Image (cartoon, grey):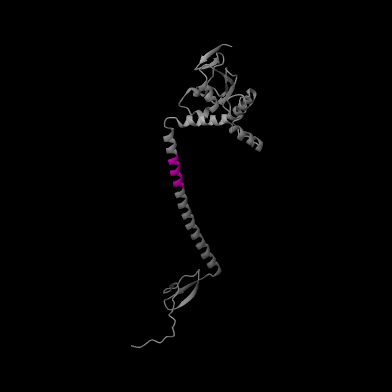
């Protein structure tokens, strides 16, 4: 196997990454540890590791630290599988099989065994993960990663602005919900009135009409006679008190 330098990585001259979907592996020649990954375009995918403008969180924290720790030429890049047509689900299955074959979670740089959502783990596994994350080494790794992110140029300002934008969006959503509640409440009141009126008319199909002096009932489906109108004229009842004549 004749190895050559390809953009800072050692590769077999007969197996250089191509512009095709597939799976790849990084092998640390110092400790024999592997990292397995997949990509829609293998050449572009592996070159992203060398691009400081890319979001490193999308490329795996453990492998990122290793690439920064070891000098150029310490990793062997190996394209392991190619597809003729991109099929992400198939690539995820292949990635999981390769991770298991190379044991690259327990003894490598992969952080999960599969990118697919699997069944829930039991309470024992959860407890093991909690205990593992409470070790001094794990805490130190978390602290280093958090410090690296926090010290990025412009990160604090972006984080502060993101919080302000989030609060503004939440306030706008709350105001919108208040308006919708008022509209819904008004509509509900009108709907109740309409139902009440329909119920009244169905139970008592009469309306009251008056000519200003007399009151009477009229069927709903009949027209109001001329000189009459809907409503009731209330007559003044005697109070029983005598009025003083002046």
Examine the rendered structure and indicate whether residue 200 appears above or below residue 64.
below
Image-based side of 130 in relation to 208, left or right: right
Q: Is residue 188 visible?
A: yes
Q: Residue furthest front?
A: 136
**Point 44% across, 33% down: residue:** 155
Instruction: From the viewer's side, name the closer residue of 81 and 66.
Output: 66
Q: Quadrant of residue 84?
A: top right
Examine the rendered structure and indicate whether residue 207 appears above or below residue 149.
below
Q: Residue furthest bottom?
A: 245
Q: Is residue 41 visible?
A: no
Q: Residue furthest top?
A: 2
Image-based side of 100 in relation to 155, left or right: right
**Point 45% across, 41% down: residue:** 166
Q: Position of residue 162 (x, y in %)?
A: 44, 38
Examine the rendered structure and indicate whether residue 244 appears above or below residue 19.
below
Instruction: From the viewer's side, name the closer residue of 133 and 103.
Output: 133
Labels in figure, total: 0
Q: Position of residue 85 (x, y in %)?
A: 57, 25
Looking at the magenta stretch, what is its main secondary structure?
helix
Q: Quadrant location of the C terminus?
A: bottom left
Q: Position of residue 206 (x, y in %)?
A: 51, 71
Q: Residue furthest left?
A: 246
Q: Quadrant of residue 83?
A: top right
Q: Position of residue 225 (x, y in %)?
A: 44, 73
**Point 49% across, 60% down: residue:** 189
Instruction: From the viewer's side, name the closer residue of 135 and 74.
Output: 135
Instruction: From the viewer's side, name the closer residue of 157 and 212.
Output: 157
Residues in magenta? 163-173
Q: Quadrant location of the N terminus?
A: top right
**Point 48% across, 22% down: residue:** 50
């Amino acid at each position: 196997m004749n190895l050559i330098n390809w953009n800072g990585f050692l590769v077999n001259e007969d197996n250089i990454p191509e512009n095709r979907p597939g799976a790849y592996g990084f092998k640390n020649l110092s400790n024999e540890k592997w990292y397995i990954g997949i990509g829609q375009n293998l050449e572009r995918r592996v070159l992203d590791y060398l691009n400081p403008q890319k979001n490193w969180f999308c490329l795996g924290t453990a492998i990122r630290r290793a690439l920064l720790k070891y000098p150029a030429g310490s990793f062997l890049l190996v394209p392991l599988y190619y597809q003729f047509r991109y099929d992400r689900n198939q690539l995820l299955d292949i990635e999981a099989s390769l991770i298991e074959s190379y044991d690259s979670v327990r003894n490598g740089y992969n952080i999960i065994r599969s990118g697919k959502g699997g069944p829930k783990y039991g309470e024992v596994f959860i407890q093991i993960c909690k205990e593992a994350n409470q070790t001094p080494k794990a805490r130190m790794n978390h602290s280093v990663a958090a410090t690296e992110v926090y010290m990025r140029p412009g990160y604090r300002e972006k984080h502060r602005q993101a919080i302000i934008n989030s609060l503004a969006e939440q306030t706008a959503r709350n105001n919108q919900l208040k308006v919708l509640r008022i509209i819904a409440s008004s509509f509900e009141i009108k709907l109740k009135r309409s139902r009440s009126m329909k119920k009244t008319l169905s139970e008592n199909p009469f309306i009251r009409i008056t000519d200003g002096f007399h009151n009477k009932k009229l069927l709903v489906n009949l027209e109001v006679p001329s000189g009459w109108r809907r409503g009731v004229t209330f007559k003044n009842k005697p109070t029983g008190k005598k009025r003083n004549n002046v």
